[in-house]
Image (tube, rainbow, N blue to C red):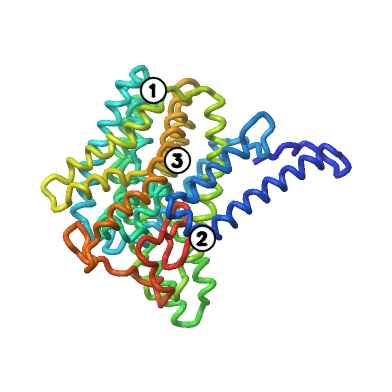
Amino acid sequence: MEPPGAECKGAANVGCSGRQGERMLALVVIMLILLGWALVAGRLARFSVTMPFAMLAAGIVLTAGPDPVFVFDIEFESAEHVVEGILAILLFTDATEVPGGILGRQPRLTLRLLLIALPLSLALAWLAGAVLLGGAGVWLLLVLATVVMPVDLAPAIAVVRDRRIPERLRQVVNAESGLNDGLVAPVFLFALAGATAAGGDGLTEAAANALPSMVIAIAVGALVGVVAARVLRRALDRGWTQPSALRIGVLALPLLAYGGAAVFGANGFVAAFVAGVFFEPEARRLPPGTLHLVEDVGTLLSLALWFIFGALVNQTLARGAITWQVVLYALVALTLARMLPVAVSLVRTDVGRRDRLVLGWAGPRGIATLVFGMLAFIDLPAGPQQELVLAVAVVTIVASIVIHGLSTGLVARSYGRTVTPAGTDEVGGASELPESAPRGGPGPAAAPAGRVRDRGRGRGRGRWRR
């Protein structure tokens, strides 16, 4: 970020002083947004107004116009690893909210979404691109499909926090969102190799590395999660460390898993998620609040990313790359290309019609789409292909924030009106139990049904979130 007037050198410069005041005013505005959110988060949650929505709006407003308050010179190459690191942290914290292993407590449903719905969604997105963006080319259309289809719960985090929505659905969506971007990544790299000058050699290498990359990522993530959890607990039991130091150690785990997988050429996102899955059982034996630091850091980093994304929206609009075809393609990707495959994948299951509709709707797009879009922008040759990928990613994310973020409350209220007095839900009739306290000890009482805990992108753990 380079604020206006950065070239001024001297405190006596009147113009520089004025612009310095503008920068401080912008900082005050951002802090007021955070403070205001902390004061009225519960009220705004009733209207499904999420923190990503608020920070995105602030980013658009404060970076718009010929003389904006903030000026961002976004260098995609330098920002690439920063964004990937943020996603790794968020995937790790997501995974600690998935009880029952990698696939959660509903492995059959999760597998149906990953192995049936996801491939069908990619195929439908490719077909929609062929109709609306026919001149883009076969490989670029596949790149676009892999960019717009990964599910990320940032725009609609309340879908896994609002207990009016059946617990079974929330568990499935949570597990799916943590795994599907890892499954899409090899397809994305394969398509990107075909769309660039890599040609046949790049395609062969991407195809050959897909399965080994996934296996290595799972192995690295499992190793980091299991070993780190046991080592931290043993160090605490022997009095070698303190709870505050444990929180710092946990913060290092997602980046350790991500970097360790990258060293072996594997998918770091899958490794970070798997590390969280294997760390979760041991985390219950650690002191209360052990995971709070990594969650809060992930929250703040993701909120900063949403603010910067607002500047990217303005830059994309200024380029004139957004057309009606791009907008329609994004809407199809968010609706038909997601909901129809989910409905097909759940045929001959005990999931009711309304629940299938909700699972199909619960496919917001966020940071994963931004990461893949940035990677494609970096690797594709300069020109219309770059602009198209960036425009599609930006429009898809903004549309998802609006559509999914503002409709979550309506979906939850539809369940709230039909919950039986005994607390049974529509899916399988299982009783909805209160959420547990934070891992490792007692915590605040569980939130009443209908109250939403929101941490911007990832999930909170027994504490009221922003």
> What residue is shown with label 2?
296
Query: Would residue 252 be seen by someone viewing this image from the given angle?
Result: no
Q: Residues within 10 Å of mark 1 (few under 14, many from 20)?
A: some
Mark 3 and mark 2: span between their CA atoms? 21 Å
Name which of mark 2 and mark 1 comes first in the sequence: 2
Q: Residue at x 14, y 53 (%)?
A: 350
- Taking the spot 30% from the left edge, 21% from the top edge, the residue there is 131
Q: Nearer the viewer, mark 3 or mark 2?
A: 2
Give me the disc on residue 371. Answer: 3
Say which of 175 and 325 sits in front.
Answer: 325
Question: Which amino acid is tagged 3?
Answer: Val
Instruction: Provide residue 275's location: percent of width, then percent of height.
Output: 37, 59
Amino acid of disc 1? Gln
In the displayed structure image, the side of residue 124 where residue 273 appears, left or right: right
- Cα separation, mark 2 vs mark 1, equals 38 Å
Identity, as a three-letter code, of the amino acid under mark 2: Asp
* First in residue order: circle 3 vs circle 2: 2
